[in-house]
Image (spheres, helix red, strand yellow):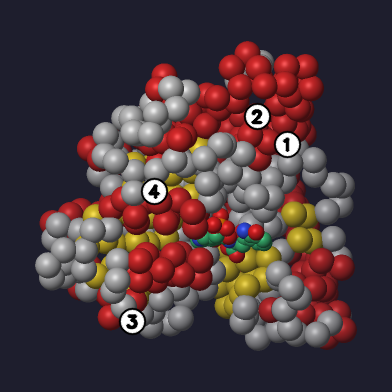
Amino acid sequence: MTKERITREIVQTMDQKDSLSHFKSEFYTQDDHYYMDGNSLGLLSKRAEAAVLTSLQDWKEQGIDGWTEGKEPWFYMSEKIGEMTAPLIGAEPEEVINTGSITANLHQLLATFYKPEGNRTKILADSLNFPSDIYALQSQIEQKGLKHEEQLIQVESKDGYTLKEDNIIAQMDERTAVLLLPSVLYRSGQLLDMKRLTEEAHKRGIIVGFDLAHSIGAIPHQLHEWNVDFAVWCTYKYLNSGPGGVGGLFVHEKHLGQKPGLAGWFSSKKEKQFDMEHTLTHSETASAFQMGTPHILSSAPLVGSLEMFNEAGIETIRSKSLQMTRLLMNLIHQELSDFGFQIMNPLEDERRGGHVSLVHPEAASICKALKSEGVTPDYRSPNVIRLAPIALYSSFEDVYEMIGILKKLMTEEKHKQFKNERGIIA
Ligand SMILES: Cc1ncc(COP(=O)(O)O)c(C=O)c1O
Ligand SMILES: Nc1c(O)cccc1C(=O)C[C@H](N)C(=O)O
């Protein structure tokens, strides 16, 4: 931690040096409001809005011809977004497609890659992953006529927040068919060593998949180079596609050409799709893992949003995000040491994602009090406050202001006015 006292002047200097600061005006942010929840639902940008309006205009003016003749033809939009996403995850364009949701894509890729055979029947996961991933794993095991209680192995966490890569590797063996892990854990923000885990799993003949929900748009990846077999993600968090925005998937080139586990007419080769044959000629790219008609109005925002990510560059985004979360942690030490907060995310740059995870016994009431004071944090049961300053639309001074607000409300015990229990979502 730094020794120098952090002042407003210091953070203002950081803002002056920030090469990404101009992006803030491209987002709908509110004055005197500090939005720290972009790790759950990112904010709307003007470019994303314009992209949706383009698709609406195409529909208005062209009706069905919008599929091929629109300004942004709908028939090719999922592939275009896949190409735009590829640089963020270190993929070849044909390895990526914009489709589905994390849960739907997990079902698709498990239906494709989970092939229990002989003794190799188990799926290795962890005990801290988001519930939807675990439900998908359980039901895919059941789909194969097996019992998930016997086949799903969930690596335990010693502290209830983080995982040790060594413990995960220790559980990989010749009975493991698939390994599925989050890149960044949704509560603690721990970033797992995807490269090492993939290498170790492959040595043992295991197929490797990652859920990139909490890393895509915040952290660079090298999925192709690391030889990851598949990955899934959502786009409504760091990629700012809006509520229910269409997700994405990656399938390594070495598996392309394989038949999708769950086929539909959008799995087709584009030039064959409208032949309407009952024998599927599936695409040879990640497009094959689509099923039905793409959700154009929930994909379109990405055409605008990803343009900004590619202009900014994911390495620059990561570097600012690390600087912001480092500042946030330093300010917590400087300003909040009397109030019983504990930082649960790993402190090292290479082990933490885009959010800071603060544990406090009164986390729920503190989050409600923060909201009443113009800060949007994110609460996760039972005691976690997640705070995510976002590289494209948060400033260093926002982080400074937000900690000032938190300190004031803790000093005045304003959170005591709120029930220490979760609302419907947070
Ligand atoms: C790690 C993780 N997996 C899965 C999900 C659910 O994804 P979806 O609702 O897009 O299927 C979320 C968030 O909602 C998540 O954070
Ligand atoms: N997907 C969400 C939704 O449909 C409603 C509210 C929140 C969400 C989220 O994304 C939660 C998020 N995955 C989390 O990490 O908690």
Residue bearing the label numbered 2? 304
In the rendered structure, the answer to whether residue 214 lies left or right of residue 336 reads left
Q: Earlier in the sequence, mark 2 or mark 4?
A: 4
Q: Earlier in the sequence, mark 4 or mark 1?
A: 1
Q: Is mark 3 within 8 Å of ligand 1?
A: no
Badge 1 crowding class, 10 Å Cα cut-off, few under 14, some 14 to 19, many 20 or more, is many
- What is the C-alpha distance between the residues marked 2 and 4? 30 Å
Of tags 1 and 3, the one toward the viewer is 3
Of tags 2 and 4, the one toward the viewer is 4
Q: Give the amino acid at mark 1.
A: Ser
Q: Give the amino acid at mark 4.
A: Leu
What residue is rendered at 51% in x and 66% in y? 132
The answer to whether 10 is drawn above or below residue 386 in the figure is above
Residue at the far top in the pictured view: 69
Q: Earlier in the sequence, mark 1 or mark 2?
A: 1
What residue is rendered at 76% in x and 75% in y? 423
Residue 67: which quarter of the image? top right
Local SS, label 1:
loop
In the rendered structure, the answer to whether residue 352 lies left or right of residue 378 reads left
Q: Earlier in the sequence, mark 1 or mark 3?
A: 1
Local SS, label 4:
loop
Residue bearing the label numbered 3? 149
- What is the C-alpha distance between the residues marked 2 and 3? 44 Å
What residue is rendered at 46% in x and 70% in y? 135
Mark 1 and mark 2 residues within 8 Å of each other at the beta carbon: yes
Pick the residue in front: 396 or 192: 192
Residue bearing the label numbered 1? 45
Residue bearing the label numbered 4? 262
Q: Earlier in the sequence, mark 3 or mark 4?
A: 3
